[in-house]
Amino acid sequence: MAEVRLEHVTKRWGAFVGVADFDLTIADREFLVLLGPSGCGKTTTMRMIAGLEDATSGSIYIGDRRVNDLDPKDRDVAMVFQSYGLYPNMNVYENIRFPLKVRKVPASEHDERVRRASAMVELDAFLHRKPAELSGGQRQRVALARAIVREPTVFLMDEPLSNLDAKLRVSTRAQIKNLQHELKVTTIYVTHDQIEAMTLADRVVVMNKGVIQQVGTPTEIYDDPANTFVAGFIGSPAMNLMEGKVERGVFVGQNVRVPGVSTKEGPATLGFRAEDASLVMEGAGERPGEIVAPIYTLELLGDATMITVRAGGALVSVKAHKDYRAEIGDMVGIRLAPELCHLFDAESGARLTPARAAGGVRAVAAAR
Amino acid sequence: MMSAKTVQPSAPLRWTIGLFLATWCLIAAFPLFWIAVMSFKLPVDAFSANPLTVIFGPQTRAAGQGLSLLDLALGLATLAALYVVAAKKLGGWVERVAGETWLPLGWVVGGLLYGAVAAGVLVVLLPAVAGGLEAVVRPIPLVGLLAEPAIGLTLEHYANIWFEQEFYRNFINSLVVTAGVVTISLTVGTLAGYALARTRSSLAFWLLISALIFRALPHSVLVSGYLPPFINSAEILEPFLGDAAPTLYGQPWAVILVLVAINQPFTIWMLRSFFANIPAELDEAARVDGCTHFGAFRRVIMPVMWPGVITTGLFSFLLAYNDFLVTSLLLDAQNQTMVPAIASFFNRETTTTDQVRAVAAAVSITAPLFLLVIVFQRQIVSGLTAGAVKG
């Protein structure tokens, strides 16, 4: 059990910067997810922790030990790979036992530990099969068992679910979450799938182009994205982002006019989530919506109807009641509450409105 | 079923293909069959104008050297049994005794042991058993005919060439050269191939290209480059080794050096592509699991890799075993390997007897090749067809 500390860790290949000044402390027993699009440096960061990649500068600590100059085998970490990395010439039992064998754990303990680990991932019935005779989900569970069996101080998981089909992904995800809870081992998990990140993580690190964009709980990064990148990456659908400018406290853009968002004048980006807006019902004597535009497209999702309009130089989506029906081209009005909108700097993309306490905004929205 | 039906070629096409393959096999295999038959006959029969005389060898039989039907049946049964043991059983035994880590070494030892046992059975046990049986059967009327010689066959050319003309020395030289070339090529090749398959350095690309260029050089260029220093090596090396400086010319072990130089680029290329098929995640998993880098190579990569090693080893073996140019130029008459020795037997060409002896030598040289392919056929096929090794 140990905390993992990265101090100003940087990875460079020639002029290319893979990871820039990564500075973070991962608490003991925490489930940390590194999230970002491909090429954002998340896997490189994990590989530097594992020792498969050397950091160009900075220090990595596991517990109290600086591990920069240690071989992977001496760092006491276990890793689960995207394409499993099972040894094809050994059966499942030998695969799981391999770490015990090379680490010279007394042979008398092997059998019990292998069986305990395989029971945790429900592989008891497959111990004598070769990896080639297993399905993808079973192979990934062998890889998990091989990581568990050693009882390491840190688990590293590199997109372990991305080779599985959608249904298996959900069940294996639940299994990983449960295992981590049972074993209470610090876990670092890399993924490009924001749903995995939201469901698994105690804390999420959103990365882009080698730079940390935001660190926070899943609720924090969902409700208070630190910049337009995080806002556009997290959530399904992602946050709507509209270009425009603030004039005397009013955000104005194509088809959009939101009063009371900011006192800072000048160009800005306004963001809101699809579920934070509502449609203006006609004929009820209401004032017109903050966005008024013709419907661009309308999608039936089953539990809701998604309405997309063109506003502020982008396509913005709004969740409406599942029974709502309209034709493409019909005019709609969309109501935005200024307190549920996020204002970002037009140049840097950084958040301008202050972050609100997590959960607070939801409470306000629910009370209305 | 439908798709299987649609790709089935039409009957005339199938017949044409069959005929073509049969003709081709015949053309390819016939010379080997024919010299094998010749080598067992007295020169009178071997050089007869009548093909049937060559095959049945009446003169040889009349000289009292022939095989009875009983001998033939016994001989064929023994050969079949040896084949089955080599192809089906040997692999299992080797794997059980040697275990995963020592498998390649186990195969070498197993192959050599098998060769020795097979030779013993064929040369000592079989004639003894056949002779005994014939002695028992001969007095019985009618059945006794089975023991009468049917086909003329003599081993005297083999005995002469192997022992009187000391072909076994050439055999040992070939063994030394071949074993040396295979061992060195594979050791350097696996290490270099692994490194080149895993490195991200751009230097690797240029190394591989230069290896290709060296492989493309005509062998005669390399040999003529090596020849003068080999002849003068005693003088050249004297400052370093003093009186112990050897003359490399005429030494079989020195030829290994040249053949390795010729063979190494190819070995590296081939092994590199085998290694490149093994996902890097495998080494990484092993290193995180507790192996050193070399440990991961030895315990995880090599066991997966060894069909590739066997295949590459086979190609190296063939190059060294069949080489003529290098061995004939760098070795003197006293120390030749088998191929140049056979060439000089043919060149002597004084009597027909000498020629049949040369033919017998030429047939002898193919026996180890058959043995090799039979023993390793499973590994060779899996090595040649191996795609990506997926975990």
Image (cartoon, coloured by chain):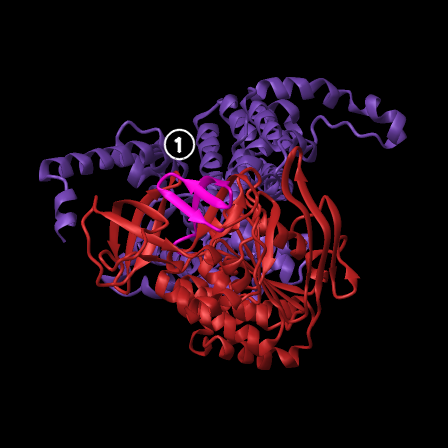
Chain colours: A red, B purple
Residue A352, placed above or below residue B171: below
Q: Residue at x 54, y 35 (%)?
A: B269
Question: What is the chief secondary structure element of the magenta stretch?
Answer: strand
Which amino acid, by three-letter code, is at mark 1? Pro
Image spot of residue B69 (x, y percent) = 29, 54
Q: Quadrant of residue A162?
A: bottom left
Q: Is residue A93 magenta-colored?
A: no
Q: Quadrant of residue A75?
A: bottom right
Residue A67 relative to residue B313: left or right:
right
Quadrant in which the N terminus of chain A appears: bottom right
Judge by depth and name the residue closer to the eye, A38 or B241.
A38
Q: Residue at x 55, y 19 (%)?
A: B218
Image spot of residue A188 (x, y percent) = 60, 62
Q: Is residue A242 magenta-colored?
A: yes
Residue B162, placed above or below residue B73: above
Judge by depth and name the residue closer to the eye, A18 or A87.
A18
Q: Residue at x 28, y 27 (%)?
A: B49
Q: Quadrant of residue B71?
A: bottom left
Residue A147 seen anywhere in this rendered image of the structure = yes
Q: Which residue is mark 1?
A: B43
Q: Residue furthest left?
A: B11
Q: Residue furthest front?
A: A285
Residue A97 relative to residue A1: left or right:
left
Q: Secondary structure at mark 1?
A: helix
Residue A85 seen anywhere in this rendered image of the structure = no
Q: Which residues are magenta?
A: A236-260
Judge by depth and name the residue closer to the eye, A97 or A140.
A140
Image spot of residue A246 (x, y percent) = 50, 41
The chain holding disc 1 is B
Image spot of residue A138 (x, y percent) = 43, 68
Q: Residue at x 69, y 77 (%)?
A: A106
